[in-house]
Amino acid sequence: MIFSKKQYFFYITSLLSLLLISYFFIDKELAKYFLANIQTYERIGDFISIWGESHWYIGAAIIGFAVFKKYKKNLLYANRFLFLLYINLFSGIISLALKWLFGRIRPWGLRDGGDSFGFLVFQNFDLGFIEKIKYQFITLADAPTTYTSFPSGHTTTVFAVFTYLSLFFPKYLWLWLSLAIILASSRLLANDHFLSDIFAGVLIGTVSTMFLYSKMREKL
């Protein structure tokens, strides 16, 4: 899973294109469908989403690092678990920063015929720069969960771990990819994200992991 610069460029531009197409043409209608069928999908989505929470992988990374560093005396595997920790923290910080920067309302804004859709950062251009920052900060502080849809944090985590597993266990690439897609899709079923949020999470999770891999490759 080591790509050339041209392959990286194609990968990134393809995902960005899918993200934009989704935002302008797919997001609303797809979200409305899952909201209209909330009794069918939400519980399934919530259950599957549990396995996309970063604390599982952060915990496993810390335990694995401690075991192989202190007891097994295996520096290679200790570094690999440390790498797992780093990719979760790094991608998670990027995801969180972007959530607060863009301030996108979740699909919940479309409930009961509502039409709340979009990003706080692209609203209220009539306000001055400082006033706009204050408005966005206050809005996010009052409803931090409601306005943190973009990107999907769960998807970021899932695809960071997918990339990790694909690097060290490439034989099972299609298994890892299938699991990652199922976990990422659960965020749609749970009515917590738009499709473009998912694409953004895929991009951040994979690219941030490959970036750290390029820095730590000799130790892994």
Image (cartoon, rainbow, N blue to C red):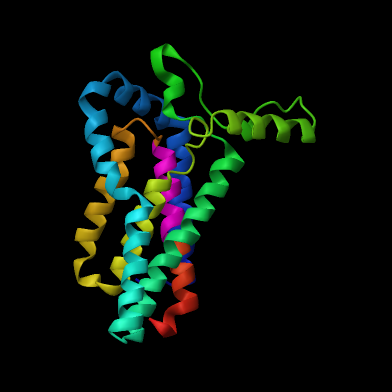
Q: Which of 15 and 51 is in front in this view?
A: 51
**Residue 116 image position (x, y, % from top left):** 51, 21
Which quadrant holds residue 119? top right
**Residue 67 image position (x, y, % from top left):** 30, 76
**Residue 92 image position (x, y, % from top left):** 47, 54
**Residue 43 image position (x, y, % from top left):** 23, 31
Q: Give the vertical position of 204 relative to 172 (above or below).
A: above
Q: Nearer the viewer, residue 101 or 67?
A: 67
The boundaries of the magenta stretch are: 195-206
Which quadrant holds residue 193? top left
Which quadrant holds residue 103? top right
Which corner quadrant holds the N terminus? bottom left
Q: Give the vertical position of 99 relative to 164 (above or below).
A: above
Q: Main structural element of the magenta stretch: helix, strand or loop? A: helix
Question: Which residue appears at 22% of the width and 34% of the height?
Answer: 44
- Is residue 2 visible in the rendered image? The answer is no
- Is residue 73 visible in the rendered image? The answer is yes
34 relative position to 86: left or right: left
8 relative position to 121: left or right: left
Q: Which of 74 and 136 is in front in this view?
A: 74
204 relative position to 75: left or right: right
Q: Give the vertical position of 119 relative to 87 (above or below).
A: above
